[in-house]
Amino acid sequence: MNGFLARYLSVFLEGALVTVELALAAIAIVIVWGLVVAVARLSRVRGLAPLAGGYIQLMRNTPLLVQIYFIYFGFAMAGFGLSGFASGLLALCLQNGAYAAEIYRGGLQSLSVKQIEGGRALGMTPWLTFRIVVLPQAVARVVPPLGNQFVLILKDTSIVSAIAVGELTHVGKLLSERTAATYEIFFVLAAFYLVMTSIVTTLVRLYERRVALLL
Amino acid sequence: MLPDVLIANFGYLLRGAVVTVGLAAATIVPSAVIGMLLALAKVFGGITVRAIVDVYLYVIRGVPLLVLLFFMYYALPYSGIDVPPLFGGVLVMSLYFGAFMAEIFRAAILSLPRAQWDAARSLGMRRRLMFRIVIYPQVFRLAAPPFVNTCILLVKSTSLVSIISLWELTLAGREVAERTFAPLQIFGGVAIIYFVLCYALSRYGLYLEERMRFAH
């Protein structure tokens, strides 16, 4: 086990780096994109809410793998091919953006209107009410479920290995085809994922403890 | 522009969809059983049992399903355990989703008001009877909406077994797309079939949620 790990550690680390890059890029985009979709879903502009609703339904009811294939193979055939990394990133963002939008929507809708009325009654401007009454509570409610979604994004990056992007799972798959040390490979692989997901989970728990009073 | 290639191959994809539905159905039942057992162990078990369940949940939740499928597909045969892919796929998915169902059932058990337990006890019910006619019916009703949502994730995740070359809807789509050079049409069609399956499930989940409102 030790010999194996020493020999292939750099290969695993390279794969883990790609996984982290993919996950961080997806998380950063999903934070913004999910909010955009949620605002569209709640907006009164004609046509915008059903459009966002349709997008959310479409994404939540189709598998990530099929979206990846659609983008990777389909776009190439249509003349604007994307790299494996870009296809995977796009699919991860489209799919998880829909879940994040629902989380944002839940957080915004769970706030009682009385809070806003209370702020206004105290003579606060709408912006001040939003900034010091609505926003802190909405953030406190939204961050924990978003954090759980980030764990899922991290795990979902493994699916991108299906189009041969050199992330952690793909590295493991290649090594297990080349060497006979399949058990070692999968224990190292699982350990890498456990460490990465544990970091995200721990950060979320710490945050939850800090904002517990706001909930 | 008519999706002629999709229409010509739609029957083949539908046969894949039948396998997908079968896979999902074959996985939902054992994962619900595993989930309930884990939830009961977590709520009523002693320290040792709870610790074991915790480790299990921690590992399963932290490792991607695809890695677990690869483990079954690549690693187990090395120690002479040759699992048939179909059985192995269903087994791994059941163990994986069982962990997610466990959380749903645990939340449902814990959300039952204490008075329900006390009332059943004070009527002199034995443990078995209490669970059968007081606890389980309410737990199932409370757990139903999130259970259905997890089933949607499960149906979507069955697509992953195509990567370990189990033939179902997604692999059928890959075969056809490679043969016809029409990936947009074919994967679009595959997505539509998944959408119909999952959307029907999600409507059912909403219906259950509506019904739940009158339950309490």
Image (cartoon, rainbow, N blue to C red):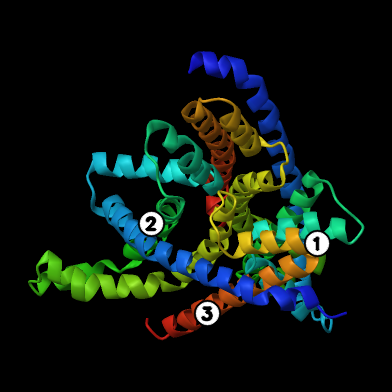
Dot placed on the residue nearer the N-terminal end, 1 or 2:
2
Q: Is residue A124 visible?
A: no
> Dot 3, how many residues are within 10 Å of its Cα: few (below 14), some (14-19), or many (20+)?
some
Q: Chain letter of disc 3? A: B
Secondary structure found at label 1? loop
Q: CA distance from mark 2 to mark 3?
A: 21 Å
Dot placed on the residue nearer the N-terminal end, 1 or 3:
1
Which amino acid does the dot numbered 3 rest on? Leu
> Mark 1 near mark 3, Cβ–Cβ under 8 Å?
no
**Which corner quadrant holds the C terminus of chain A?**
bottom right
Secondary structure found at label 2? helix
Image coordinates of residue B117 in percent, x first then y, are 21, 68
**In this picture, is A87 found above or below A16?**
below
Q: CA distance from mark 1 to mark 3?
A: 39 Å
- The numbered disc on residue B47 is none
Q: Quadrant of residue A90?
A: bottom right
Q: Which residue is mark 3?
A: B206
Secondary structure found at label 3? helix
- The numbered disc on residue B181 is 1
Dot placed on the residue nearer the N-terminal end, 2 or 3:
2
**In this picture, is A55 found above or below A21?**
below
Q: Which residue is mark 2?
A: B102
Image coordinates of residue B208 in percent, x first then y, are 46, 80
Q: Measuring 24% from the left and 53% from the top, which residue is drawn there?
A: B44
